């Protein structure tokens, strides 16, 4: 397919020639036909005169007409859609009149979305908790905004937006913006801070809300709202700690929306309104760190943004780095270091399985010339990126020295988009006249950014909390059942994080002695897994049941696979299942029966994983 654009391999837009300043959305939400009808009016800034055309990204969009608005005139614009690339999108060319001068230009596009829009999921009432009302939500990152509206769908471009949404009046509409007004089925919003297209977001459903603080509420369906308010009760503290590290919170509001279980990610940092999966509601706040992560994106990602998704680590690696600092300030160094140790376990597992045959995707900076960002998504930029930053932090003398630099970097690039070289040059510039500059020369940038595999250097972490998970994994993999039954270590009380890491490490062992029904039963009994509400614990336990090929566990396995469609969980479960000959048919049949309830990206990714797609 090749690179679509020079600035962004996955967008046809030409940000060197024209940028979007502001977009006005008018949508009518049509639940009967699962479509959005309406218009977008883009205020463009033409950077050169005599520009022949404005190029936008679209995917499965039907255009009704396009006009240039000026004074009281509207001039029709010639347009055509070409160069369709599977799973990526097409090029929309808007021809400009000859002699168009540089500067501002208002263009209105009337259009509708397809009922297959890749960035939207429409749920029937039966698919919601309340069962009475339909629901719709978006997921635009990385390149699905183009299925909601024709736009410059590249994070190299940032624009403000306002919107007016007509929807069934009994439902509530939320967007990644501030609310301007709500009345009789029309809701209006405004996002006064320029954002990349991937941060556009909308959700509509029968929603209620509880306050978490002065400028912070949690939203969700009635049946889950009390639990959610309790689970995320630390949000305000996290916001305070994040502000200490990163500077003022500029987005005014910080709300959470607890999504339906078909939300494909753990969380999504939509500005003013983080989307979060219900699978992190464990009942003991143990998985609420996802909020620290999404909150940290308010700076890294939403203020300082990767210019294209080859440099995704500038979003996610930085965000994990700050998320870890938040965890450290709230719960201390031991928890902080255990947090890093746990995500390293996840990285090893990812490299061992998901990326086993795709070593080039284990690089920190990836090549997206021939595929889309969804195809390369993994924990690599998260973990390798944050380890890289920790390594640099240690090199320059620790947090007291590095955190002021972090603030400098965030201020320098706020409201802008960056590539890895911007980070490198800013780091070198900042420390150039200090005694740290020689230390920085030790960084082998090429090694860190372009080498495959695990991070080249892993700092020493406090192992206090990890010792038990390591030891347990070794015990359970190497000892027979009767030996375990008489072992004192096995009976020790451990935290849910330790349980997660222990099970994650156990899965890594190629050989697990006597992996049979009795051992799995004893594991379940010892750690009270039957009653666990913790999805990360259940996920790892279910994978062990599959490893043990326990047919009598098939109902539990399928029940878990159908309880949520978060890709982190369902992709490995299906991949594991099809490698178990007796389970393969059951898995494929189940997948077939539920795939319509998944987001297109989720069902397509699983299909690709399972090699079902005709290539
Ligand atoms: N921005 C991501 C989610 C995302 C990434 C969506 C790429 C689409 C494309 C979000 O901030 C994230 O990283 N979520 C994590 C949770 C986090 C605690 C690591 C997830 O979904 O697992
Ligand atoms: Zn993230």
Image: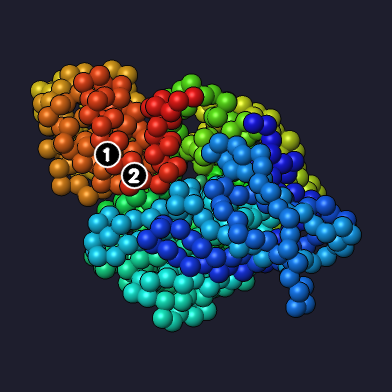
Q: Residue at x 59, y 65 (%)?
A: 39
Disc 2 element: helix
Q: Tell me if I can see residue 281 in this picture.
A: no
Q: Nearer the viewer, residue 159 or 266?
A: 159
Residue at mark 2 to residue at mark 1: CA–CA distance: 7 Å
| Residue 307: % across, % down | 67, 48
- Image height of 362 relative to 306, above or below: above
Q: Residue at x 32, y 72 (%)?
A: 208
Q: Residue at x 68, y 61 (%)?
A: 66
Image quadrant in which the N terminus is located: top right
| Residue 426: % across, % down | 74, 49
Q: Nearer the viewer, residue 416 or 63?
A: 63
- Image height of 614 relative to 399, above or below: above
Task: Provide the residue designation for mark 2.
Answer: 596
Disc 1 element: helix
Task: Provide the residue designation for mark 1.
Answer: 593
Q: Nearer the viewer, residue 155 or 323?
A: 155
Q: Residue at x 27, y 60 (%)?
A: 125
Q: Quadrant of residue 338?
A: top left
Number of disc labels: 2
Q: Tell me if I can see residue 184 in this picture.
A: yes
């Amino acid at each position: 397919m090749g690179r679509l654009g020079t600035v962004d391999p996955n967008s046809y837009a030409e940000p060197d020639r024209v940028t979007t300043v502001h977009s006005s959305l008018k949508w009518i939400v049509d639940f009967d036909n699962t479509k959005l009808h309406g218009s977008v009016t883009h205020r463009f800034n033409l950077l050169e005169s005599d520009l022949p055309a404005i190029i936008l990204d679209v995917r499965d969009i039907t255009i009704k007409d396009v006009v240039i608005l000026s004074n009281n005139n509207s001039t029709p614009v010639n347009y055509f859609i070409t160069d369709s690339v599977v799973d990526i999108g097409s090029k929309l060319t808007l021809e400009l009149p000859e002699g168009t001068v540089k500067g501002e230009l208002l263009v209105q596009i009337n259009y509708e979305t397809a009922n297959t829009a890749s960035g939207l999921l429409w749920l029937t009432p039966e698919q919601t908790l309340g069962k009475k009302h339909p629901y719709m939500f978006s997921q635009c990152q990385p390149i699905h905004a183009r299925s909601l509206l024709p736009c410059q769908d590249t994070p190299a471009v940032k624009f403000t937006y306002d919107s007016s949404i007509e929807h069934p009046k009994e439902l509530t509409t939320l967007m990644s913006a501030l609310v301007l007004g709500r009345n009789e089925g029309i809701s209006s919003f405004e996002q006064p801070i320029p954002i990349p297209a991937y941060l556009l977001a909308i959700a509509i459903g029968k929603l209620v809300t509880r306050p978490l603080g002065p400028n912070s509420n949690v939203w969700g369906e009635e049946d889950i709202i009390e639990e959610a308010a309790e689970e995320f009760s630390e949000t305000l503290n996290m916001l305070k700690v994040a502000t200490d590290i990163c500077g003022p919170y500029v987005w005014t509001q910080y709300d959470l929306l607890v999504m339906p279980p078909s939300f494909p990610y753990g969380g999504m940092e939509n500005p003013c309104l983080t989307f979060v999966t219900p699978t992190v509601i464990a009942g003991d706040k143990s998985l609420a760190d996802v909020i620290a992560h999404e909150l940290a994106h308010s700076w890294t990602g939403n203020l300082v943004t990767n210019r294209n998704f080859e440099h995704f680590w500038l979003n996610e690696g930085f965000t994990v780095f700050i998320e870890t600092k938040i965890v450290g300030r709230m719960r201390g160094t031991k928890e902080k270091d255990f947090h890093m140790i746990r995500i390293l376990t996840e990285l090893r597992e990812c490299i061992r399985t998901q990326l086993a045959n795709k070593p080039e995707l284990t690089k920190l900076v990836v090549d997206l010339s021939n595929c889309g960002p969804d195809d390369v998504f993994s924990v690599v930029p998260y973990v390798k990126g944050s380890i890289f930053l920790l390594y640099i932090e240690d090199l320059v003398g620790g947090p007291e020295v590095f955190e002021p630099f972090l603030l400098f970097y965030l201020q320098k690039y706020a409201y802008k988009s960056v590539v890895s070289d911007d980070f490198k040059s800013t780091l070198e510039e900042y420390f150039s006249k200090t005694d740290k500059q020689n230390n920085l020369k030790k960084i082998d940038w090429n090694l860190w950014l372009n080498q495959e595999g695990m991070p080249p250097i892993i700092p020493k972490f406090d192992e206090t909390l990890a010792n038990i998970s390591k030891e347990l994994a070794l015990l359970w993999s190497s000892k027979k059942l009767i030996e375990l039954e008489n072992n004192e270590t096995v009976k020790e009380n451990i935290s849910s994080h330790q349980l997660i890491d222990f099970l994650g490490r156990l899965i890594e062992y190629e050989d697990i002695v006597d992996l049979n029904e009795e051992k799995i039963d004893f594991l379940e009994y010892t750690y009270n897994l039957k009653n666990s509400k913790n999805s990360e614990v259940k996920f790892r336990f279910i994978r062990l049941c599959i490893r043990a090929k326990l047919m009598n566990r098939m109902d539990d396995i399928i029940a878990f696979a159908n309880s949520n469609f978060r890709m982190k969980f369902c992709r490995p479960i299906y991949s594991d299942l099809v490698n178990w000959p007796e389970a393969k048919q059951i898995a494929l049949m189940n997948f077939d029966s539920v795939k319509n309830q998944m987001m297109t990206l989720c069902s397509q990714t699983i299909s690709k994983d399972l090699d079902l797609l005709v290539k």
